[in-house]
Amino acid sequence: METKLWGGRFAGEIAKILARFQNSYRFDRRLWRQDLRASIVHARMLGRQGIIPEEEAERIVAGLEAIRADLESGRLRWPEAGSTWESAVAGPHEPEEPEDIHTLVEAWLVERVGEAGKRLHTARSRNDQVQVDTRLYLKEALAGPGGVDEAVRELQRVLVELAKQYGETIMPGYTHLQRAQPVLLGHHLLAYFWMLERDRQRLADCLRRADACPLGSGALAGVPYPVDREWVARELGFSRISENSLDAVSDRDYVVEALSDLSIIMMHLSRLAEEIVLWSSSEFSFVELSDSYSTGSSIMPQKKNPDGAELVRGKAGRVFGDLLAVLTVCKGLPLAYNKDLQEDKEALFDAVDTVLGSLRLLAPMLATARWRTERMEEAASGGFLNATDLADYLVRKGMPFRRAHEAVGRAVRYCLEKGCRLEDLSLDELRGLVGAGAAQLIQPDVFEALALRNVVAARRAPGSTGYEPFRQELAAASSLLERGQVGKED
């Protein structure tokens, strides 16, 4: 099987170590569906435009469709792909590895349809061919069935269901990882819903720029054939064609943008995973993960570890590295194509796989967890989470906020020394702590202002943690989820 498309210029064989070093078949063969799809449309266009005889175009299409069917059924087996260095120093009788998926498909085609198969590459370069394959892959990986957007929506669905079930549980809200003010558990969970909604918006925006068909750009300067680029774009589901052939074959902006968006998703998932790790610890005990989503220790029989969440947290760095790798590859390249650009695919594939795996793990992990709402409410009752509300009470009575802040600070210090809560103080104690000049401001209704549920209920502004704003927020999130559409940006 001939697996080189460029041998005529060369009198000798390529060094085996270089061949294995530069071959991309080991990772780009996952583009086989996209490569066959684009090749079928390209062959039909060649026949329609009279660039090759129509009967030969039909034979090419039939051959490509047969290859696709045989790969899908398993009748056609993939050549083995060795590791880069071990294969490079193996014995002389080792079978040659294909250079890439594109040359392998063409070689299979020529075996099946003969000389007609060698016409497929007319008016096409591997430079625009690999670009169209990668763009098709990205569109499917991000927005197709089983893709990233679908997995994000599933995690959003779980968050909404949890917010419906446990949403009005009061828990501590934190700043600096210190208890700050009481919030509703549902409000906390939906914070991640809106992060993920922005992620969906970014993915959709990225796909708008990736949705340009580069076929017809050739190696860099276009092609001297009467190709119908618009027809090819429509047949492949692209909204438009690329505008500049030099840019079309060397552009990896859409890969960088996708990796950036995937990195932001992983950053959000890492934050969520970190909270799962914290909340499942005995120090918090806010959540207990299902045995199905926990692991144990090889030496400590009592341990129940949140390894899945920890791995999501760790794998965020891997996706960040994929982004940095491609940015570094692209930063100093002259126009147009350079072999460096081959390095984009492993990073892209790895990032997509890592994000999908993380999303698909976190959704059932959260859905099957035991949410210890009683422990959350117990934690919210300590730590002076109503201190700000005592200051606000004094402000409503006429005291300047800065003076109120100082007075409540004294009250908190007094409670710490006494070992009690603000609401445990007597009316006389509270009046004495704010000072003689303001004692009359403290009335019996102060205890209503300090009650935890009233503290939460007082947050009535849209977007707040109060009961009514939370119910409106939950309704909005549920509506977005039911429509299945990406929410509009403000």
Image (tube, rainbow, N blue to C red):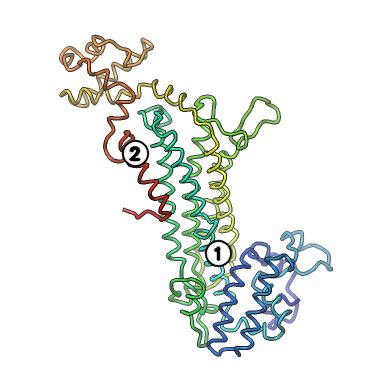
In the displayed structure, 236 sits above or below 362; it is below
Residue 174: x and y in percent read 40, 31
Distance between the Cα atoms at labels 2 and 1? 39 Å
Q: Quadrant of the N terminus?
A: bottom right
* Quarter assignment of residue 167: top left
Pick whichever of labels 2 and 1 is earlier in the sequence. Answer: 1
Whether residue 63 sits left or right of residue 263 in the image: it is right
| Amino acid at pointer 1 | Tyr
Q: Secondary structure at mark 2?
A: helix
Residue at image position (67%, 30%) is 297
In the displayed structure, 262 sits above or below 162; it is below
Q: Are marks 2 and 1 in contact (CB under 8 Å)?
A: no
In the displayed structure, 156 sits above or below 287; it is below
Whether residue 398 sits left or right of residue 268 in the image: it is left
Choose between 255 and 6: the one closer to the eye: 255
- Residue 368 image label: none
Choose between 279 and 406: the one closer to the eye: 279
Residue 430: x and y in percent read 25, 13
Whether residue 371 sits left or right of residue 178 in the image: it is right
Q: Nearer the viewer, mark 2 or mark 1?
A: 2
**Which residue position is annotated with label 2?**
471
| Amino acid at pointer 2 | Arg
Residue 196: x and y in percent read 44, 48
* Quarter assignment of residue 113: bottom right
Residue 252: x and y in percent read 50, 65
Whether residue 128 sits left or right of residue 29 in the image: it is left
**Which residue position is annotated with label 1?**
137
Label 2: how many Cα within 10 Å (few below 14, some 14–19, many 20+): some
In the displayed structure, 149 sits above or below 250; it is above
Label 1: how many Cα within 10 Å (few below 14, some 14–19, many 20+): many
Q: Secondary structure at mark 1?
A: helix
